[in-house]
Image: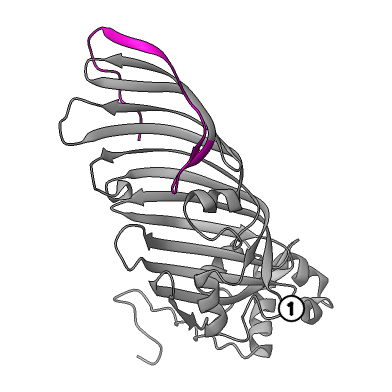
Amino acid sequence: DAVPAAAPGGTWAEGRLIVGRIDGRHWRQKRAGARFSASGGELTLYEGEVELAPSGRLRGMARLDLSRPDEVPFWLRFELADASAAGLAQQLGMTTELVTGRVALKGGAAGFLRPGHPLLADLSGLVELDARDGRIRREIPPFVAIALASDAFNPFAARDSVRYERVESILEITDGRLHTESLTLDGPDLRVFASGSVELVREPREIDVDVALFLFRQLDRALDKIPILNLLLLGADENLVAAYFELSGPWEKPDAKLVPLRTFGAGPAGLVLRGVPQLVLEGIRKLEGLFGVVREPEPRPQPPAGLPTSGS
């Protein structure tokens, strides 16, 4: 959300705020500083910079409404750079060994500070996620569920972790849930496309996510004798959709349901086939026959109303 304009009235306080090291349970920093300005019942923090522990630099601004006796509405914008995935997990009280890599975040949010009330319950905002060059271990609950749901499409069948080169998403926080329309993970081991939501406040933390899992180099050997099809269908990453999963249930132990695709172009797989020439699509249909994929017959076109049909 955009930070609203400052309250009318003269400024009655301004200066610079500096805070030293904090080693709390839910917040760890080496140092922090910001300029501040107070007008009426509002406090504005700007040119803020926090050096997180063990890594990461947070910059931003915030405005707090101090005029209410029982709550403090606030608005903020922020940008996080040079953070490690393990360090960010530590800040959130999560296991640090499950994900590695470099993480950048930027976004804005609005909410209320209330005594004894979870911050995330009333928080709303958007966050852009960009993670690079790391690994995800198979102990992450959604990956555990996928591995249990299908032996054939288990991304951890021969490895303890999967590598990624980049993870990107726009995350929305509202009503105590984290939601995304599109999260993509690209790497040499697999590609993942996901959409859905996770409960952040209420227990159990329910997850409701659809996942398209693309495994790399699964069809190289089958397609390497068809160079044009290999290039246009698989692209530079040489991958084809492998499976589509529906995940639901508590985050700590979700259920994963393998949803069979009737064609390579069905469901999320169709995203990678848009714009493919008809000649190549015909080749895909032949491949579907080789792999035992069943395609529904195309519906026959119906003549316009009032025109005679054949045999009439």
The answer to whether residue 32 shows anywhere in this view is yes
Q: Amino acid at mark 1?
A: Leu
Q: Residue furthest right?
A: 225
Is residue 224 shown left or right of residue 105?
right
Magenta stretch bounds: 1-29
45 magenta-colored: no
When the figure is inspected, residue 168 is found, relative to residue 61, above or below; the finding is below
Dot 1 corresponds to which residue?
A: 219
Q: Position of residue 270 (x, y in %)?
A: 55, 68
Q: Position of residue 228 (x, y in %)?
A: 79, 69
12 magenta-colored: yes
Secondary structure under badge 1? Answer: loop
Of 301 and 109, nearer the camera is 109
When the figure is inspected, residue 308 is found, relative to residue 80, above or below; the finding is below
Q: Position of residue 197 (x, y in %)?
A: 39, 61
Disc tally is 1
Is residue 237 shown left or right of residue 267?
right
Q: Quadrant of the C terminus?
A: bottom left
Q: Position of residue 307 (x, y in %)?
A: 33, 77
Residue at 28% across / 9% down in the picture?
12
When the figure is inspected, residue 114 is found, relative to residue 36, above or below; the finding is below
Of 262 and 302, nearer the camera is 262
The answer to whether residue 48 shows anywhere in this view is no
Residue at 64% across / 75% down in the picture?
155
